[in-house]
Amino acid sequence: MSSVNSALFRRVLDDAERYKHRRKIVRAGIIERLLVRKISPDKLHVNPKDEFTHQDVGPSEHIVEDYCKDVRFYQRHGGDIFPEPIIVEKMESDGYLILNGHHRWAAAVKMMVPKVRVVIVNQ
């Protein structure tokens, strides 16, 4: 595991541990679910149950780097960072739990993207 991936994985593990027992999900209203919104990656939290947070699987540095290339492209040529939004659930406090899009989130964090597109769902 490289040092870049190690730093990223440390953040993933810390976030997963922090929200393992404090991730009360609340139902989002119909308007919240209908809109694609832009939210700071700092408000998004990894899902402790996702394989992305498991030490033997973890985030793929190759996949994250591919998404970082996409970020650079969109920053140079305009357009939304990651046309496909990250899928999240609303948490009681502390933001949103990522259901799909962990690698895109990791690339956004790494590239210091101020806001990413998200869709809020109720499971």
Image: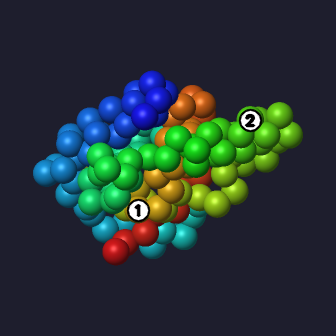
User: In front: 2, or 34?
Assistant: 2
- Closer to the N terminus: mark 2 or mark 1? 2
**Direction from residue 76 to residue 33 in the image, left or right:** left
- Numbered badge on residue 72: 2
Amino acid bearing label 2: Arg
Q: Is residue 52 visible?
A: yes
User: In front: 36, or 116?
Assistant: 116
Query: How far from the left and from the top, in percent, is residue 18?
Result: 21, 40
- Numbered badge on residue 99: 1
Amino acid bearing label 1: Leu
User: Which residue sits at x=66%, y=45%?
Assistant: 66
Query: How far from the left and from the top, in percent, is residue 96?
Result: 37, 52
Location of the C terminus by quadrant is bottom left
Query: How far from the left and from the top, in percent, is residue 3?
Result: 45, 25
User: In front: 98, or 30?
Assistant: 98
Q: CA distance from mark 2 to mark 1?
A: 24 Å
